[in-house]
Amino acid sequence: MKIRPFFVKIFSLHIFSLFIIVFVSMALTVNAISDMMYKKTEKELEDVCMLVCNMFPADHVISLYDAEALCLQAAAGTGIRLTLIQYSGSVLADSVSNYRNMTNHFDRPEIIDAFTHDIGHSIRRSETLGIHMMYGAVPIPSMSFLIRASIPLKEVNSFIHRMYDKIVPFVCFILLLITLFAYFFCHGIDRSISSITNVTRRYASGDFSSEVAIDDAELRDLGQAVNYMGQELKSRFDVITARKEQVQNIINGMINPLIVVDEFMQVRELNSAAKSLKGGNPADDFSGKNLSDVIDSESILKMVRRVFDEKGHKSVTVCTDSTKNIYYYVNISFIDNLSLRDRRGNVLIIMNDITGIKRLDNMRREFAVNVSHELKTPVTSILGYVDTLLGIYDEHPEKVVDFLKIIKKQSVRLSCIIEDLLFLSRTDDTYMQLEKEMVDANELSSVCLNSVSEMALSKHITLKCDNRGVKTILVHPVLAEQAVNNLLNNAVKYSGDGADVILHLENDGNYVVISVEDNGPGIKPEHLPNIFNRFYRENKEISRSLGGTGLGLSIVKQVAETHGGKVAVESTEGSGSVFRIYFPV
């Protein structure tokens, strides 16, 4: 007969459990009997002490010779040792040893226990005989001495050993019967489970025609449940197959391309719209082919690899045909365990055609650029005339000069808004190809700090740079400098006199992080989610009084996203803020 691993496991478990139960029961039984024997022996020693106590006359004093003779007579033929001990601890008589050579017994445990509880007990090694003894002692107040009875402990233990000799063969016989019972019981279970296993394997392969036949009453219900499961699986499998075909038809009918790829960038599933991205035929089979055979976009391929690494979600807008200006908004999502065989997950790519939206967006941007240019010309003229008036006016200039200063201030602010709008318009195109280059980190820091040094000096603000090992940064130099300058300008503007503004540079995995830390007034928590929105201000009056346009942080965010990075802010009201720009490595 072939021994199956399951049979070995269940049989071993049964035998082990039963052996443990038997041995624990035997140990508890023997321990209880041993404890009972010790209690019984202690009681017998008490009875002997009381019997000898009653043998002493109560009406007159007995001599030492008579006391010793009485001890010898009472202990004769019993195997019990009797000892008479004065309250002071001196030994008066002993039935085994010469009491004259014995030391004072006042410190013996059984003597102390007898004084405390009227009856004393102890098990210890006899200093006189050199063997382990069980002691019992009873005081006789009328004669001012104690009677102590003792017996060698080996006599008690010998009874326990004899009990072991009788119990062990019986236990072995019981274990043999248990082993035979467990063998036949486990063999029956194993045979039934083997039958269930074979049927379930057929179910797993798609064959639902087999049924389990079990004779054992214990597993008959399980067999019936497996048969019912097979029927349900067949029914649901048919439903799933039909739904899968329906879903496949729906996917093929989508006008948006849909692609599923595995970790090796091989195509697992795709619809007809995806097959036509590179002019393919809807009847062509792309399964198993590389994603580059379906999509001709390096940015999408890089984003898919990043999604596999990060196991997250990414969105990107790409131009798949620069001559026809065809744009797609691509959602790339990691799908964990698409099926039982896909232990490492897949990536789902859904492409939405946004060519029309992009065209409208370009029209909106062009309009903003045209309006900005139209506004810039009269503002420049106003600034020129105001500067001329301020330079030549010399009679009663107080009121007029004040008005002219206000006009200039507002004109400068309007000019800054227009410049910021133009900058946002230039960088708002997420499809623009940035001409990035490796910029020296220390040089970029120095240029940006110098740009705000005069304003910081006027407010006695200390500027610091903390470069934690960053040597170069891959960025567009002008855009990166503009973003860092905006953060430094805000930090210096909103910090009080004598404050510290620190520019940090550090590496953080796939990013170089540039952060600006200040100890200004901070930002309230409710404003943090919107702080990078265009024209959003926490306090409009303060921002306008400091010359802010409401676009500085929007420009910072736009520059970061144009580089494929991100922005973040941490702020505590009253304790300052930390703004961070993440540039991809």
Image (spheres, grey):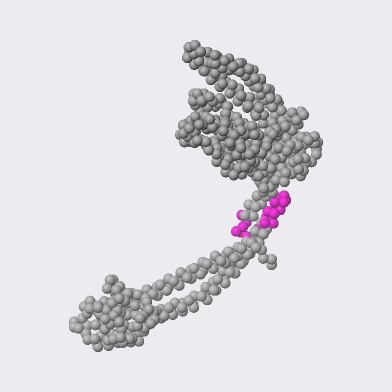
Tally of marks: 0
Question: Can you tell which quarter of the image residue 426 is in?
Answer: top right
Kindly identify the residue that appears in the image at 66 percent across and 56 percent down.
196
Q: Which residues are magenta?
A: 197-221
Kindly identify the residue that appears in the image at 63 percent across and 17 percent down.
377
Instruction: Tell which of 172 and 424 is nearer to you.
Output: 424
Furthest residue toward top: 395
Furthest residue toward left: 59
For the N terminus, the quadrant is bottom right
Can residue 244 be seen?
Answer: no
Question: Could you tell me residue 514's position as x and y percent?
Answer: 58, 38
Question: Could you tell me residue 341's position as x and y percent?
Answer: 69, 49
User: In the picture provided, is 169 more to the left or to the right than 201?
Assistant: left
Instruction: Tell which of 37 and 397 is nearer to you.
Output: 397
Question: Could you tell me residue 258's position as x and y percent?
Answer: 71, 37
User: In the picture provided, is 161 more to the left or to the right than 507?
Assistant: left
Using the image, determine if residue 194 lies above or below residue 306.
below
Can residue 141 be seen?
Answer: yes
Kindly identify the residue that appears in the image at 46 percent across and 79 percent down.
162
Question: Could you tell me residue 98's position as x and y percent?
Answer: 31, 87
Kindly identify the residue that appears in the image at 29 percent across and 79 percent down.
105
For the C terminus, the quadrant is top right
Instruction: Tell which of 186 and 545 is nearer to you.
Output: 545
Q: Is residue 320 magenta?
A: no
